[in-house]
Every structure is written in structure tokens, then in C-alpha cells.
Image (spheres, rainbow, N blue to C red):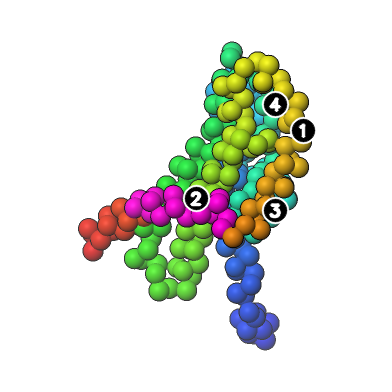
Amino acid sequence: MNDFAAAVRGLDWSVPIQILLSVLPALICITLHECAHGYAASLLGDDTARRSGRLSLNPIKHVDVLGLLMLVVFRFGWAKPVPVNMNNFKDPKRGMAITAAAGPIANLLISLAALFIYGLLFIPLVGREWGQYVLETVYMTAYLSLTLALFNIIPIPPLDGSKVLYSVVSERSYRRLMYYERYGMIALLILVVVMDRLPVDPLNAAANWVFSRLFIVAEWGFDLVRLFL
């Protein structure tokens, strides 16, 4: 038993820990993103997500494998869409827009909350090995959640931005957009490939710019802890 314990302690845990530090924040971000969609739809009169078991904090119910890999590797991705029946809304187009917007808004709030927590935890945990892992996880959650919000407001189906766009166009344009929605995933993958080949990734550049402005929230948490030291 002692030999086994010694062998375990001697293993290089850096790779699995780094994978965990990437996957765990991604799971948090996409799970809360999809739950926000479901709860918004439920409040507006559509209980499709509730009946299908998607108002759940179980990440397995929301994970799209390709979208999760994209989020971990490229820092932007997507989850399995929450089912919504817009015919259950009093105003279908408005209800769909609000439901769609709930996801990115939730991610923005998650990013702000994670930044504040990062600031609160920085002084107590910095310099400690396990504390550094906690800080990295919280920091990555804040950053990934922001990139998920920005990525999803792009008006390409099936991203949330397209649903918001549909709410402000004419009925004729709306029907046309709905027809072409089936090709949205192809367009999305092309967009990802193109952005990856550009000298400067516009999404990451935008995310870095916004994140640097939002980091003041982490400073608020940091300053709050310093008041009690």
C-alpha cells in the first residue's frame, strides 16, 4: 500500500490537471448558459425545456462534444441547444429573442461574478500550489464565459445572435432566414476556420479588450479583502 501511495505521488499530474482546468470552466459556462435559456423560456410560458429535463445543472444534459472541444481549444464554442417552442410565447418573435439573449447575458454575469471571486481569493490563495489551481480555474471561468457570450451574439444560426436578429426583421425576411438556418452550422464552421487563419483572431482580440475592461471587478474584490487585512 505504501509503495502504491509513493507511486501515485511520483506521477506527473500536470497534464491531467491542465486538462481539468480547461474542461471544468467550459462545463460551468455552457451548463449555466443553457439553463438560462430554459428558465427564460419557462418564465415566458414555454415549458418545453422543463419537460425535456434541460433545466438541469447536470453538464451531460447540455454538452455538445464538438462545441465543448471548440470552447476548450479555441476559447469559443457552443452547447446542445435547449428545445424551445416559440408558439407557446404570447409574442413568439419577442419571446424567442428574450430567450436567446438570456444565454449571453448569463455568461456575462458569470464572468463578472468569477472576476470578483478571483479578486477575493487572490491574496489568500496566491503562492500556494493548490490555491494556484483554484485561481486558474476561476480566472478561466471568467474568460471563457465572456468569450462564450461574445461568440453567441454573432448573428449566424444556430447562435443566439441570429434569434435576436430574427425578432427585428420583417415577416418575409424572417421566413427567408428560417429557411437558410439549416446551413448555419456549415457557415459557423467556415467562420471558425477563417478566423483561425487570420493574422489576428477578431473574436479573441475583442474578448481580450472587453476582459481587460471588466478586470476592474477583480480589483474591487482584491481591494475589499485588503480592507480586512
Q: Residues within 10 Å of mark 4 (few under 14, many from 20)?
A: some
Measure the C-alpha gap from mark 2 to mark 1. Answer: 28 Å
Q: Mark 4 — residue?
A: 177
* Residue at left offset 65%, top offset 37%: 156
Q: Mark 1 — residue?
A: 182
Q: Is residue 77 left or right of residue 104?
A: right
Three-letter residue code for mark 4? Leu
Please say whether residue 99 is visible from this viewpoint: no
Secondary structure at numbered mark 1: helix
Q: Mark 2 — residue?
A: 206
Q: Range of the magenta residues?
A: 200-217
Three-letter residue code for mark 1? Arg
The numbered mark, 3 or 1, whose residue comes first in the sequence reads: 1
* Residue at left offset 66%, top offset 84%: 7
Q: Mark 3 — residue?
A: 193
| Picture layout, residue 221 above or below residue 99 | below
Three-letter residue code for mark 2? Ala
The numbered mark, 2 or 4, whose residue comes first in the sequence reads: 4
* Residue at left offset 68%, top offset 16%: 172
